[in-house]
Image (spheres, rainbow, N blue to C red):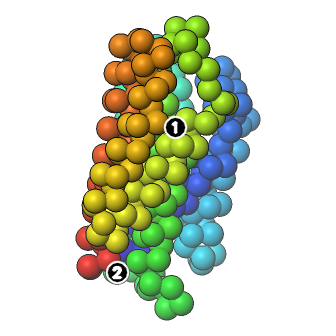
Amino acid sequence: MALLIKLLIAHLLGDFVFQTQKSVKHKEKHKLKSIRLYVHALLHGLLALIALWDLSLWYIALVIAISHLLIDAAKLYSTNKNNKRWLYLTDQVAHVAVIITIWLLYDGTLINFEIKELPFQFWALVLCILFLTTPVAIALKTFFTRWKLDSEVTGVASLKNAGKWIGMIERLLIFIFVVMGHFEAVGFLITAKSVFRFGDLSKAKNMKLTEYVLIGTLISFGIAILTGLAFQQIVLL
């Protein structure tokens, strides 16, 4: 289990933390001619090698780097305006499938990945916290590209990236509440957000904005709750 969790952490770092929007656009424009595509794949291999912490396992990192390059290249040449959201999901599923396959082939059989200094529950906590920040924010942003709302349409102006940071803080708080077993605090947080949002929605008088906020809130909260429940199950292993 430690191998799987650490490789997933490496994947999230490579795809969401250390990859900029500028790099993504450069890859989309130049595809296989983009040097950033190859740097991105090499970064995933390096992060995987760091996660493995054993130079003799270089071939596993190489498999991850090559597979990441091939999957991303296939995505770049297949993406269009109609399938961008679903290909994004397919791309992530493919990357995770490679990692799971490696885990099933090697963990507990050919290689000993037991971590004596830190229990795998610690790495699971790191994975959950990391997942609930930038990765979920980017996933939600990609999903909501089908609906574009700006201040001219809604009548409400906001700080740059404020919604992203609010969402990340909300998910982390909900995760903590769920892990600690305080579901009543989750209800309180939902109520508090509803009170603060009510003024903006009333001022905008825009049904699209109301639906946009409601869908985003429910999905974001749902992901955080499910992540918290999943972590509880991992701790019980």
Dot 1 surroundings within 10 Å: few (below 14), some, or many (20 or more)? few
Q: Residue shown at 46%/26% (left/top)?
A: 199
**What percent of the width, then of the height, locates residue 11?**
52, 54
In the image, what residue type sits under mark 2?
Gly
Q: Nearer the viewer, residue 136 or 10?
A: 136
Residue kind at label 1, given as amino acid type: Ile
**Sequence-wise first label, 1 or 2:** 2
1 vs 2, front mark = 1
The spot of residue 64 in percent (x, y) is 52, 55
Q: In the rendered structure, find residue 108 and report the number of the disc placed on it.
A: 2
Q: Position of residue 89 (x, y in %)?
A: 39, 35
Above or below for 182 versus 66: below
Please tell me how many numbered marks the rendered image carries: 2
Residue topped by disc 1: 138
Give 142 or 48, whichever is nearer the viewer.
142
Residue, x 29% and y 69% (percent of image)?
A: 181
Is residue 213 shown above or below 18?
A: above
Badge number at residue 170: none
- Badge 2 crowding class, 10 Å Cα cut-off, few under 14, some 14 to 19, many 20 or more, is some
